[in-house]
Amino acid sequence: MHTYKTKGTCSTRIDFDVVNGKVTGVKFVGGCSGNLQGIAKLIEGMDKEEAIQRIEGIRCGAKPTSCPDQLAKALKECE
């Protein structure tokens, strides 16, 4: 299991794993519960690189990042 401390978002942490190149077990701590549960379910089982491509660069209002963007950053750091 990997843990990523988010920066610039309402969520404070993302826990997740990557098994055989697939994203699994995504859990956000804090943030907009319903939306983040939805994102976690949509990403579940998705190829890591496809997930990054789909969610990287998403912004939340005027913020330069978002919870999905922070997940993309976490996935990029994960080997």
Image (cartoon, rainbow, N blue to C red):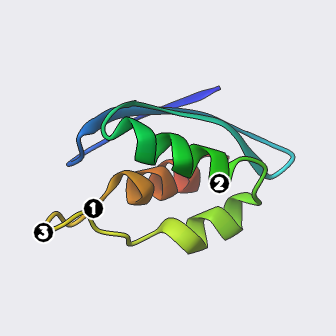
Q: Residue furthest front?
A: 34
Mark 2 against mark 3, which lies toward the viewer?
2
Q: Relative to residue 21, is residue 44 drawn left or right?
A: left
At mark 2, the secondary structure is: helix
Q: Write the residue at 80% across / 52% down.
A: 21
Residue for badge 2: 42
Q: Relative to residue 12, is residue 27 drawn left or right?
A: right
Which of the pair 59/35 is nearer the observer?
Answer: 35
| Labelled disc at residue 65 | 1
Q: Residue furthest right?
A: 20
Residue for badge 3: 62
User: Quarter of the image holding residue 13?
Assistant: top left
Which of the pair 79/6 is nearer the observer?
Answer: 6
Q: CA distance from mark 2 to mark 3?
A: 24 Å
Q: Write the residue at 49% across / 48% down.
A: 74
Whichever of callouts 2 and 3 sits on the residue coming sooner in the sequence is 2
Mark 3: amino acid: Ala
